[in-house]
């Protein structure tokens, strides 16, 4: 009996061992499946963490770009404001200079007309000076001779006219 009990005990132990062996095989297969699932989950987690890190870097880059763009917008708005003010000042200066230029053009036109008048007066004065210069060059004796000749000519013309009148009277009397 003891051998039977030992055999039975041995059989129980073998059955238990076989059962434990089957359980361990099942557990080993289950462990492999679980390890594969864990590895997939770990890979997925690593991929997601990498994507999250990339997205965080991209978000930081976008946030920095937005901040830079805001600063650039402010600089450009300041520059636009300055240019607008400068444009207003330049328009006022242009209006002022246009008014001054119009006045100067009118003054220039008046002065041009005055210059033309003065030019003609200068030309007349130059002619008078030339005539006076020519008259100075004429010899006084020539003038006396011309005056005497003119006086003689006047006397001769008077004499001819008197004779003509007498001729006409005689003819009328006849």
Image: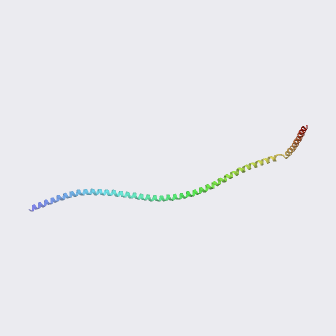
| Residue ranking furthest to the front | 173
| Residue ranking furthest to the left | 1
| Residue nearer the viewer, 152 or 62 | 152
> In x, y percent, where is residue 167?
89, 38
The residue under the point 63% across, 54% down is 102
Q: Quadrant of the N terminus?
A: bottom left
Image-based side of 25 in relation to 7, left or right: right
- Is residue 23 placed above or below 144 in the rendered structure? below
Based on the displayed image, in which of its 4 quarters is residue 64 positioned? bottom left
| Residue nearer the viewer, 138 or 2 | 138
> In x, y percent, where is residue 168?
89, 39
The residue under the point 62% across, 55% down is 99
The residue under the point 57% across, 56% down is 91
Q: Quadrant of the C terminus?
A: top right
Based on the displayed image, in which of its 4 quarters is residue 14 positioned? bottom left
Image-based side of 137 in relation to 34, left or right: right
Image-based side of 149 in relation to 39, left or right: right
Based on the displayed image, in which of its 4 quarters is residue 154 positioned? top right
> In x, y percent, where is residue 32?
25, 56
| Residue ranking furthest to the bottom | 2
| Residue nearer the viewer, 162 or 68 | 162
The residue under the point 34% across, 57% down is 48
- Is residue 134 placed above or below 88 in the rendered structure? above
């Amino acid at each position: 009996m003891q051998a039977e009990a030992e055999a039975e005990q041995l059989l129980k132990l073998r059955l238990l061992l076989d059962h434990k062996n089957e359980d361990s095989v099942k557990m080993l297969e289950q462990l492999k499946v679980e390890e594969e699932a864990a590895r997939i989950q770990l890979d997925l987690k690593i991929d997601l963490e990498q994507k999250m890190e990339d997205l965080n870097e991209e978000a930081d880059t976008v946030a920095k770009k937005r901040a830079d763009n805001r600063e650039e917008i402010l600089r450009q708005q300041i520059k636009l404001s300055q240019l607008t003010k400068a444009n207003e000042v330049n328009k006022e200066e242009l209006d002022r200079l246009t008014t001054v230029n119009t006045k100067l053009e009118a003054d220039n036109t008046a002065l041009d007309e005055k210059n033309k008048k003065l030019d003609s007066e200068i030309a007349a004065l130059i002619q008078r000076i030339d005539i006076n210069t020519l008259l100075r060059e004429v010899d006084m004796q020539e003038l006396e001779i011309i005056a005497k000749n003119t006086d003689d000519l006047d006397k001769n013309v008077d004499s001819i006219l008197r004779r003509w009148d007498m001729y006409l009277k005689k003819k009328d009397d006849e």
